[in-house]
Amino acid sequence: MTGAGPVAPDLNGLRTLLHGAQTLGGPIGTTLALCIICGCLPFEIIGLRLEHIDWDNSIAPVPARNARGVRYLGLSNAAQQLIARTAGTHRGGGQVVTAGRGTPLTKAQVRLDRVREQLGQASTATLHVAWNYHGIRVACANAMRDAGIAAEKIDLLLHGWANNPHAQMPTFPICLPAERWWQILNPNAPRK
C-alpha cells in the first residue's frame, strides 16, 4: 500500500475497528487501539515508553517523523487506562504495548497488511471497513471538525506539540483535544 492516500473510514467504521482491536488484544491490538484513541500512527505508539509518560499532565513524548526529535502527544483518560491495563502499572519501563516485557514490537510487525489480516481473524466485522493508518487520522479530524472543534485543537491532537525552538506551547492543556476526541468516538463514556 506504499504511496496510497488516506483511506478514511466513517465514525462508525472507526468504532468497529476499535472494537476489533480490543477483541484482538495483545501488542498488535493495543497498538491499533491506541492509534485510534490517540489519532496517531503506529510508529509513534511503538516508540512510546512507559518511563517517559508524564501521567500528571497526560502527555508523552513520541518520536517525530523521520527521527527529527520528539513531539508531545496528549493522552486521554481512556488512553492512559489502556496503557496502565497493558503494563499493569503506571511505573516501570519499556515499550508501552509490550508492557516492557518480551520482545518490543517493530515497525514491520505493525505493517498495515499484517494488522488487517490479524484484525480480520479476530473480528470479521472489520473486514467490511476500508481503512489505513493515515485514514484513521483523517477520519479523526473529520469527526472533530463536524463536531465544531477548532482547527488549532485538531492540529494539536494529530500533530502534538513539537519540542523545538519554533513551536509555541499551546495555551490550553495538550490532553484536552484528546479527551474531546474520546468523547466523540465513545459518546457513552463518562466525562473526565
Image: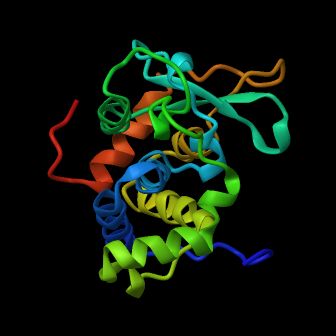
The quadrant where residue 75 appears: top left
The quadrant where residue 47 appears: top right
Residue 130 lies, with reference to residue 108, above or below; the image says: below
Q: How is the image coloured?
A: rainbow
In the displayed structure image, the side of residue 27 where residue 161 appears, left or right = right
Q: Position of residue 11 (x, y in %)?
A: 36, 69
Q: Quadrant of the N terminus?
A: bottom right
At a point 35% along the width and 42% down the height, the residue shown is: 180
**In terms of depth relative to the viewer, which is nearer, 96 or 128?**
96
The quadrant where residue 73 appears: top right
Residue 25 visible (yes or no):
yes
Q: Position of residue 10 (x, y in %)?
A: 41, 74
Q: Position of residue 178 (x, y in %)?
A: 42, 39
At a point 66% along the width and 49% down the height, the residue shown is: 106
Residue 152 visible (yes or no):
no
**In terms of depth relative to the viewer, which is nearer, 146 or 159?**
159
Q: Position of residue 20 (x, y in %)?
A: 33, 67
In the displayed structure image, the side of residue 11 where residue 67 appears, left or right = right
Residue 53 lies, with reference to residue 121, above or below; the image says: above
Residue 34 lies, with reference to residue 170, above or below; the image says: below
